[in-house]
Each structure stands twice: as C-alpha cells, then as structure tokens.
Image (cartoon, rainbow, N blue to C red):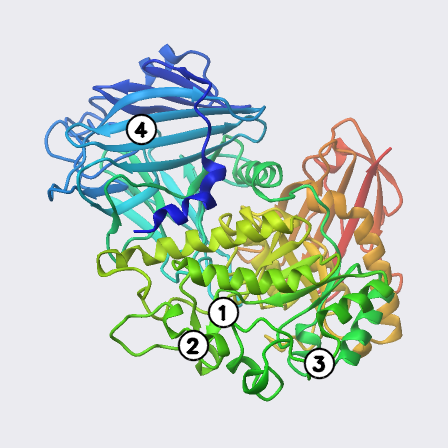
Amino acid sequence: MHLKNFLPAFAVLAASVAFAADVGDSFLLHTRSTTMAFAKRNGAWNLLHYGPKVAQGADAAALASDGFAGGSFMATRRPAVYSAYGDKAQDKGINKFGGLQVTHADGCLTTYLEGVKAETVEDRPGVTHLVLTQKDRVYPFYVVQHFRAMEGCDVVETWVELRNEEKGAVRLGRMDSLALDFPLIANRFYLQSATGQWSCESQLVETELVRGQTIAIGSRSGVRDAWEANASFMLTVGEKATETSGRVIGGVLCWSGSWGLSVQRDQCDFVEVRAGADTSQGAYVLDAGKSITLPKFALTYSAAGKGQVSRNIHKWARDWQLPAGHKLRPVLLNSWEGSYFTFTEKVLHDMMDGVKEMGGELFVLDDGWFGTGKYARDAKNQDRVGLGDWVINPEKLPNGLVGLNDEAKKRGLAFGFWVEPEMVNTNSWIYNAHPDWIVREKTRPVNVGRGGSQTVLDYANPAVRQNIYDQLDALYSKIPGLSYIKWDANADFMNMGSPYLDAEHQANMPFDYTVGLYDLLAKLRAKYPQVDIQACSSGGGHADYGFLRYADEFWGSDNTDARERVFIQWGESQFYPACAIAAHVTDVPNHQTGRTTPLKYRFDVAMAGRLGFELHPKNMKPEEVAFAKQCVADYKRIRPTVQQGDLYRLVSPYGGSPLASLMYVSEDKRRAVVFVWSLERGICHDYPAPIVLQGLAQDASYRLKELNVMKGAKHVRVDGKALGGDALMSMGLPIRLRGDYDSAVFELTAE
C-alpha cells in the first residue's frame, strides 16, 4: 500500500498539536453568528445544537433534543458528531446506517466509538480549531474529527482522519467526511441540490424530505464529478425558505472524485446528513499502521434564507479556499470556438490583435498544439491522438508556445494554454511506451472514450504523476511570465482498476487517483504560484472545491448560449463566487444551441461572472468591436464589485418568471451592480414589476448609471439620478424591457 505517497496533498488540513488545550466534556464552537454545541454523553461525542448563537453550554444541554422525543420511546437516537454503522443509536438495536462502516481485521462489522481526547489546537487568526479523537471501544481504530470555525464568514470546516492501529488491514465500506445526526429541529424539511449533464450543468431542484425518506445524490464519474450533480446542498429547516427568509443549512464537499451525499429523516424527525468519497466500487483497504485523511466539508447556517448561505460560502471561498481569492480575474480570449483545431500562428496573432483592441488582458490557446509525428494533433486527427505527449507540434507552431508568448507580450497581453493532463490517447507515444499507465482492469479489454482512443491515466501510480509533472514543468519553465493554464478532463472512469495497485487494494483506486491528482496540482502550484488555473472538465465537470483548492476558477459550461447560461450560472452561484465562474461572450448562432441573441445580451450575461471571449474578433463588425470596447472598459471598472462583492439574487429564472435579476454589493456598500435579463416575452412583460434591490446602505444616496447602452436604448427613466438606498430597497427600480432577449446592467455609486 502506497498511501504515504498521497498524504502530502492533504497536508494543508493538518494542524500542529504543539499548543493544544483540553476542552473537557463540552464545548461551544462559535462563528460570528452561529454556534455548534458539543457534549460527551455516555462516553461518545454528540452535537447538541447547530444554529444561531447560544452563550451558555448549560442552556444547549438543557434544551437539546435527547432521550424521549415526539411521544415515541423509539426516539432515543443520539445526535452523534460522526455516526458509525453499529454504534448504539437507539436503546434497543444498532445504528443500521452511519457514515462510517468498518470491517475490522478480525471480520467484525460494527464500530462503537467513544471519546478519548478533545482539544482546541492553535490555528490562524479568526479560526477556532476543535479536534475530537474517538476510538472503537474494543479495537485500536481511531476517528479523529476536526471542526474548524472560520468566524468571519460563518463557515465551519470539518474533516476526518481514520487511523488503523489494529494488527491487520481494515476495510472501509463507507468513509464519509460528514456524518452528522442533527436532533429534532422541525416538522418539515426541504432539500435543494443541483443536477445536470454536459451543457446543462447546475440545474436547481428542490424536494421535500418526508419522514422515513432518504434523498441521495452523487457522482461515480471519478473525474467529471460535478456533471450528474454538484457536491453541495441547502437543507431548509421548517417552512420552505426563500432567498431572504427561512432557516437553512448549506454545505459543500471539497472533493473532485466519485462522491455521495444523502439526507435521511427518520420517523421522529432526526436528520442525518452524510457526504463523502464514494466506495460503491468496493471497500477501501486501510493497512495496519496507516491512516487516511478524508475530504473536507464546509458547513454553514443562516436564519435569513438561502441568499445568506451563498454569501457565507462565497466569502469563505475567497478568504480561505481559493489560492488567490481576492485577485481580480483578467478579461481573456480563449481560442476554442474561434478556430477549433484549424489555427495557424497567423490566425492566433490575429486573435491577439482583436482581443487587445477590445481591451482584453490575456490570450489563451486551446486544444490542438501538441503531439509529434503520426500522433500530432491537427484538423485531420483532431481529438484522436496525442494526449499525454505534451510536446509542441512544430508543424502547427513553428515558433512554439514561447513564440506565442512573445507575440502576446508585444501586444501587452498575458499568455496561457490548454492541457488535459489526466487523460491519454491510446494513439500516443506515452501509451505505446507505458500501456500499464492507464486506469484499466488487468484481465479485460480497454474501454475508450472521446475520439475512439481516450482513457484516463492511473494517478494512483507515482511514476505516472512524476512523468506528467516533468513534461508540464518543462513546458512551463520555458515560457517567461506564463500566466494561465486551462486544465481540461474529458472522460470518466470507463475502466475500473489500477495496474499499479495489487489485488488486495484494487478498490482503493478511485480515492487514491483523486489524492494523486491533488499531489500533482499541489506540486505545480508550489513551483508556479503565479500561474492561474482554470478547472475545466467537458465544461463544468470540475466545479468543486476540491479542485478549487488549487485552481482559481472553473469553466461554467461548454454551453455558451447566453439564455442557457442565465440558468447555469444561477445554479452555480448558489455556492461559487463570481470570481470563480468563467463566462464568455461567443459568436452567433450559438455553437451549442443554434440560438441567436443580441451582442448586448451576451455581454450582460457574461459580465455577471469572470468576463471573457470565445470567438474570432475578425468576424465581428466594426460597430460590434466598438461596443465590446465600451463593455470591457465598464467591466474593468465594476470588476471589483462583481468579483469580490456580496451576491443578492433578486428574481429567480426558475418557476416561470419572464426575467431574472441579481446584484452585487461591495463590502463597504459604496458600490453595487444590478443585472436584469429577459427570458421570454409576453405582451405585458416589457413592464415588469420594479426590481426591489437588496444589500444597500439604508441611509446612503446612490447615483445610478446604466451600462452597456446600445444605440441610446436605455431601460430606466432615472438614469443619472441619485436615489436613496432605502427607496431602492422598498419601492424598487422600475425598468422597461424591449423584446426578446433584452437586458440591462446598472451601476450604483454612493455619494
């Protein structure tokens, strides 16, 4: 077993215990406005309360749901901080669920946890770090659970270390990062999650959770983890929440591999939430004397609706999770839809000229630049050859990537390029040399994907990771000032197995693959901290906070149709800040849907995220280029507010609304930006109800300016006027829309 090779990737989660303080048998873990109340009962740690702040642990203990509840003698389930299969959840019988299931070295299937140590450990300013160590009552098997309260953003990070000190290997049938039993807290619950597939990512669904029901979501892709569903949820406690009202628990699993998340409500209204790496392919084998660190989970609570849950997670992401969450993201042009595989150096230089004229700051070369000889990618071979051979195709680029970087610099642009390091074509030099370097069963034919030859590299194997690191390092190091990498991944686990792992540890491959991926990303990030990374995976397949520990943004979707992007970006905004959502203006008819939308509409949608282009500027008319220059200049001015501000979702596109609207407000409430997008047009939809704004200062006066105005067609009668924050948040902003796919953007500046 080679787990020791993977642990450095999770080293950021470990805390020194040099300055530990014992907390006794109870503890209150506070953020700015929430409390988690813990107590050790009958030898094991329980969660007595999670919600609004409480000051006294004695109050939490006295009022916690415990023992008999709801008039039923069966309601004696304890609210365990980490539930295990077999643990005594009721006075009679065993817990048949649980987020941890261990088959011990002697074959015993159950685990009974008891607390052996509880302490706070030194962490960073503004963070309280609680560590609860529990042990099976019979076996030397340890569960070390971390709770790290990020006080300023009302988020609690939690993760688990499992340590096997038994004489033989144990098998982890389930190994969830989060396995909390919440006590009796309401008579109704609603679960919101995001589902989707290629080009329709992050579609929101909400379901009532009834008694006796379990709702489960997840992904077994192994790579494109955010396609089938996103590893996040909002759980409404009580009556159905809105953006501005209701009790809501929200959370995200920070993991890029296969995962599962479930919410179970029993007959007495205890709710267990479980989330973690998926083990449906088989139990993970943890050898004697070894430990494993499970993925992090970020948890937040709001008594003021779903919008506050989003703002909490966004702030946590910018402050704590993203590598450079407060860095303003550049306006870029990515070459893909402008040229696909048919580019030449001249075509790319023309694209650079075009994006520079429009005010862009970065040029990114997409797929098709690599491979040599019979495995060189070009317009003929397209996606069938070359993956894994990260060397320049000299016929396509006689001056190489260095030459393109030089040309970009001449124009005052930064430079970046596309790679797909998790994948390999069977038509490649690397595969010919190392056919045992891919994920595959040892006794079965290799299943292949895109282009009839694509498969996944075995990142459980350190030699594979080292080879890819060496290749990428050689490329990066030769490009002075390299600014950006688009990291793509266009396949799932089509095969299940690792030639590197022995027969005993085959089921470990999916987890070890993902930790191996993090190991590679961490090494590259450490050596090239200035290189921004976009997490792309056939579109939004890498929209997850595991990858975003190392990447700066993700590609929202291959679907660049502006109307579709309203829904996709709305779903992504539930848990991901605007600075992390790449949104591009593309040509029409749209390459995915065939829909034609106005250029203004395309800009107004893309400017709500990290603005970019995905087209060839030479195909734009002179008046379109002039309009684009105006939009980019305006975006650069509002960029700090959009990318770093607090999000308020005003009118949802879901539920048949003819429009959607959201806004961003700067932290000091001095600046705000409002977006309005028409979705359909009926005879009365040109004059919708006023858009009631949120998040402004009640006593401030805001000068309103409409942006991206085309041909003098303004959407408000109060453009240029100073308006009170109180009036804008009570009476609202009256607007007029004109026809299909109309839109408006407003900038508000406090005076």
Q: Amino acid at mark 4?
A: Pro
Per the image, label 4 sits on a secondary structure element best described as loop
Separation of residues labelled 1 and 2 (CA atoms): 9 Å
Residue sitting nearer the eye, 25 or 374: 374
Among numbered discs 1 and 2, the one appearing first in the sequence: 2
Separation of residues labelled 1 and 4 (CA atoms): 42 Å
Among numbered discs 3 and 4, the one appearing first in the sequence: 4
Per the image, label 3 sits on a secondary structure element best described as loop
* Circles 2 and 4 in contact, beta carbons < 8 Å: no
Per the image, label 1 sits on a secondary structure element best described as loop
Q: Residues within 10 Å of mark 2 (few under 14, many from 20)?
A: some
Instruction: Tell me if 634 is positioned left or right of 372 in this view.
Output: right
Separation of residues labelled 2 and 4 (CA atoms): 46 Å
Query: Residue 249 appears at what percent x and percent y?
Result: 44, 36
Disc number placed over residue 343 in the picture, else none: 3
Disc number placed over residue 183 in the picture, else none: 4
Q: Amino acid at mark 1?
A: Asn
Among numbered discs 2 and 3, the one appearing first in the sequence: 3
Q: Residues within 10 Å of mark 4 (few under 14, many from 20)?
A: many
Residue bearing mark 2 = 449
Count of numbered circles on the image: 4
Write the residue at 89% across / 61% down.
712
Residue 606 quadrant? bottom right
The correct choice, above or below, for 713 with respect to 187 in the image is below
Query: Residue 315 appears at what percent x and percent y?
Result: 60, 37
Q: Amino acid at mark 3?
A: Phe
Query: Residue 613 appears at what percent x and percent y?
Result: 73, 66
